Structure formats: C-alpha cells, structure tokens
Amino acid sequence: MTRLYALLFGTALVAAPMAVAAEINISYSDEFAETLEEDYGMREGERLMETVRKDLEQALERQGVDVAQIDVTINDAKPNRPTLQQVSDQPGLDMFRSISIGGMDLTAMAYDGEGNLVAEVQYDWYENNIRDVIGASTWWDAGRASDRFSRRLAKQLPGAAS
C-alpha cells in the first residue's frame, strides 16, 4: 500500500508544474494612489492588488514558466459600481443600481535570477459598452483586465508555451 502512495505522490510531483515568480511586487502609480485615497478608498486598492497577484500566479502556473521577480504597477482602474467610500462620500449613489464602464491599466517588468529584464508588458482594457455592465460586481471589468494582462505577460516569458 505504501508503494501505491509513493507512486501516486511521485506522479503528482512530476505532473504538477512548479511555476511561480519568486517575488511579485505590486504598486500603484502616484496618480492612482491619489485616486484611491481621495475617491475609492485604500481598501479597494488592496483588493485590486490581490486580484492581480492571484491572476499572475495562475497564469505563470498555466504556462509552466519561472521568473525571479515581477514588478507590476497599477496605473489606473475604474470600478463598475461605486465603492463603499464613494457611496459614503456621495449619498446619491446606489451601490446596486449605479453602474459605469470599468477596467484597468497595468504595466509589468519581469526579471530572471540574474536581474536581467526578460519581459515588459503594458496593458489596458476598459469595457466600451454600458449594456455589458449589467450584473457586474464593483471591480468586474478591472478583474477581466487583470486576467488578460497576466496571461499576456506569462506568454511572453522565456519557456512559455506558444
């Protein structure tokens, strides 16, 4: 029985791709940091950072690539629905019925273990049709932009599948 577990465990190790950036640094542009502080709330920035981190980790794993460091800058993001701070600051907004076109603008630089730049990506995507926003969560379109950005970056890294 222990041989069976060892065989299954060994197979799982071989089959599972080990692809993660050793270090993923995510920051905001000065302008977006100001927007977070004054309009959206800093908590919203943390949510966006976690979304980008999760999307990058998944994209790297899917491509089966390793990179030592990725530095990402969130240059801008627009919510589809008002944030808690916006509703608090502007009581006329409705968290459920107020909608807008959202999206995100990101830049990343990826480095190998020797500190050489191996990929640089700038990506922005914003929804262009308000009719497609119905049913969207606060950061729905920003999440779509993050996913597309992450997949694009992972495909440009050395060793990525075509």
Image: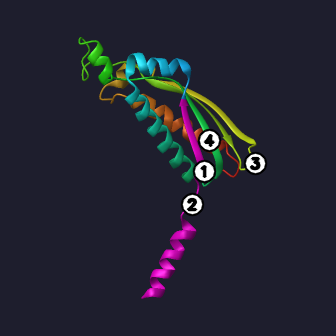
Amino acid bearing label 2: Pro
Marks 1 and 4, how far apart at CA:
8 Å
Q: Which mark is residue 22?
A: 1
**Label 2 sits on residue:** 17
Task: Based on the picture, tell me whether residue 21 belongs to the magenta stretch.
Answer: yes
Quarter-wise, where is residue 132 in the image?
top left
Looking at numbered disc 1 in the image, what kind of residue is underneath it?
Ala
Q: In the image, what residue occupies the spot 40% across and 26% down?
A: 42
Q: Residues within 10 Å of mark 1 (few under 14, many from 20)?
A: few
**Residue 161 appears in the figure:** no
Position of 83 with respect to 48 (left or right) is left
Quadrant position of residue 38 = top left
Does label 2 or label 4 sit earlier along the sequence? 2
The answer to whether residue 156 shows anywhere in this view is yes
Residue placed under numbered mark 3 in the picture: 114
Residue 22 painted magenta: yes
Q: Which secondary structure lies at badge 4?
A: strand
Callout 3–callout 2 Cβ contact below 8 Å: no
Which label's residue is closer to the chain start, 2 or 1?
A: 2
Q: Amino acid at mark 4?
A: Ile
Front one among 19 and 88 = 88
- Element type at mark 3: loop
Q: Which residue is mark 4?
A: 70
